[in-house]
């Protein structure tokens, strides 16, 4: 009788463990990594020396990734918030973006913020802009996550179309 009870218990446990209920594939919740950059005209290559050299700024970049059930990245997006201060009154921002390149090395644009020329005018030399939901290629997102110092953010103005200030990305 004791042996029969142990066998019955074993069958019950085994049937409970081999449930045929399988959950459908789902994506995991998003993971966000924050980067910042301290933006200075002296960081441009060459450094800015005209009337806009007194300005400075910062940018916060939130890179959000979602993974599928297998753990593969399925989407990558970025949000930008840039702050600018101490510029000449009515400075006009033309464009802003992330480039490849170490400090002091100019590189190609890899992520555009979608700011249009003249869209941001710095009232009294100060201003902010935000952009959200800009799609990134997953391999580019992986490169930025692996080596943020290999990328920089810069802002261009009408007076400095090659870039008025820049800073290397730093993971927070």
Image: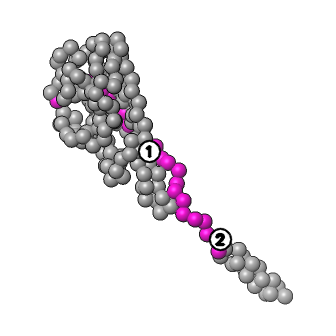
Q: Residue at x 21, y 14 (%)?
A: 51
Residue 89 found in image quarter: top left
Q: In the image, is 67 to the left or to the right of 160?
A: right
Residue marked by disc 2:
21
Provide the residue span drawn in magenta.
Answer: 20-45
Question: Relative to 79, does residue 46 appear above or below in the rendering?
Answer: above
- Residue 60 placed where, x, y %? 39, 32
What is the quadrant of the C terminus in the image?
top left
- Residue 107 placed where, x, y %? 20, 40
Q: Residue at x 22, y 17 (%)?
A: 53
Residue marked by disc 1:
64
Look at the image and say whether residue 38 sits in the magenta stretch: yes
Mark 2 Cα shell of 10 Å, populated few (<14), some (14-19), many (≥20) = few
Q: Mark 1: which secondary structure? A: strand
Question: Relative to 170, does residue 146 appear above or below in the rendering?
Answer: below
Q: Earlier in the sequence, mark 1 or mark 2?
A: 2
Q: Residue at x 33, y 35 (%)?
A: 114
What is the quadrant of the N terminus in the image?
bottom right
Q: In the image, is 6 to the left or to the right of 118?
A: right
């Amino acid at each position: 009788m004791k042996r029969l009870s142990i066998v019955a218990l074993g069958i019950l446990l085994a049937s409970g463990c081999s449930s045929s209920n399988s959950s459908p594939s789902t994506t995991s919740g998003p993971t966000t990594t924050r980067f910042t950059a301290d933006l200075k005209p002296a960081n441009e290559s060459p450094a800015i020396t005209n009337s806009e050299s007194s300005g400075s700024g910062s940018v916060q970049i939130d890179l959000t990734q979602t993974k599928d059930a297998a753990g593969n990245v399925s989407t990558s997006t970025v949000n930008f918030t840039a702050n600018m201060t101490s510029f000449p009154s009515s400075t006009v921002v033309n464009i802003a973006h992330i480039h490849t390149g170490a400090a002091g090395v100019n590189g190609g644009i890899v992520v555009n913020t979608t700011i249009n020329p003249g869209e941001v005018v710095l009232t009294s030399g100060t201003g902010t802009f935000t952009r959200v939901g800009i799609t990134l290629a997953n391999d580019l997102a992986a490169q930025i996550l692996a080596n943020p110092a290999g990328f920089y953010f810069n802002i261009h103005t009408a007076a400095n179309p090659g870039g008025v200030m820049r800073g290397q990305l730093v993971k927070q």
